[in-house]
Image (cartoon, grey):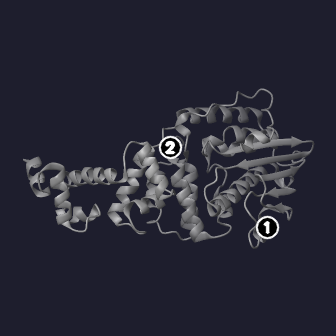
Amino acid sequence: MDHANRMPHLTPHSGSEPIPQQPSALADTVSARLTTLVLDVAAHVGVSPHETAFISDLAAGQDNLDRVPTSAQHRLWEIVHASGGPGVGLQAARLAEVGRLHVWDYMLTSAPTLAEGFVDAAQYLSTVADPALVLTVISDGPRLTVGYYGARYSEAVDWQISEFALALLLRRAREARGAAATPVRVGFAHRAPARHAYLVDEFGTGNIHFDQDADTLTFLDPDRAGSGIAGDPELSRIMRVYARSIMASARPARSWLENFRDVLLMVLSTGPATGTILDDVAQRLSVSPRTLQRRLAEHGTSGRAEIESVRHDRAVRLLLDTELPVGSIAGQLGYSDHRAMGRAFRRWTGQTPDAYRRCARN
């Protein structure tokens, strides 16, 4: 069921712009800024840079227009959870100082009221997150509830992302409204952990519930007189205009097939860690081997064909652009020895690797 359609949204405040359309370039991607934040958490909990090298390369630009595949972000959270354990999502929120997520951070801090800030944060969430994620905002007299709905991935990762999302929203609310933004109720969609005292400490309330329909924060009269900083309606308008320009100009993410080929090349160069080459690629892409095969078929190709293609293209490049011996190139492409690569290369070109190199350079 579509949870977002079960909960009424607050309408944008008077004078605000139309709800922005979600450009197709944003689909199945997140902002590189969000990914670099989680990469920092990975480093903080002791994850080896080798484990996150591929994801780090994707997020290296840190440009406000750059996007990273959501699948890579999920894989990163999986690695972070394995090393950091319970509460690592909260650590991510603690590292997210204002400005870390660029324009989205200022939606709450510049709005005239917390409710209006949450509405803007919901409408422009795609500046940092996958468009599949949804924030809902409900006002019921003095009670204000913001709900977070994310696509389900795996229990461990969903758990960490949910805690990160609510802790981040609470941090921004507190930065805007101070102590008045202490929640009176917190709900999590995931099951209750063995101990959740760390959540009581983080959210400032023991009224925490689990196995809910959504992850939610409920506040009581957060905009009472004297709470927090005064909003700036003009700055809020400027933030919305800028957010729309970022969404409209976001660079199309690399295609799924391009992403697959990069991961495949990495697995070939290091050797499969879990069994077959494609099993290891599937793990790194955070999908099952069966799903991986189905996605390849949808793109008109197969695992075997892609392994051949990637090996061929990389072998030719290394032969032409480097002085590496054939044995070293064979190792980088996951062959058992240079003879195995030689047989494959003759099948592709009708020549041995050494002969191909000599002919191409003469």
Mark 1 in CB contact with mark 2 (< 8 angstroms):
no
Callout 1 secondary element = helix
Q: Residue furthest bottom?
A: 194
Q: Residue 161 at x, y = what percent?
A: 65, 57
Q: Is residue 31 found left or right of 273 in the rendered image? A: right
Q: On screen, 26 above or below 336?
A: above
Q: Residues within 10 Å of mark 2 (few under 14, many from 20)?
A: many
> Distance between the Cα atoms at labels 1 and 2?
35 Å
Residue type highlighted by circle 1 = Asp
Q: Which residue is mark 1?
A: 201
Q: Decide which of tag 1 and tag 2 comes sooner along the chain.
A: 2
Foreground pick, 341 / 140: 341
Q: Is residue 180 found left or right of 32 in the rendered image? A: right
Q: Quadrant of the N terminus?
A: top right
Kindly indicate the quadrant of the structure image that contains residue 108. top right
Q: Residue 110 at x, y = what percent?
A: 74, 41
Label number found at residue 66: 2
Whether residue 229 is visible here, answered yes or no, is yes
Residue that appears at 84% across and 55% down: 183
Q: On screen, 99 above or below 240?
A: below
Foreground pick, 65 / 30: 30
Residue that appears at 48% across and 38% down: 252
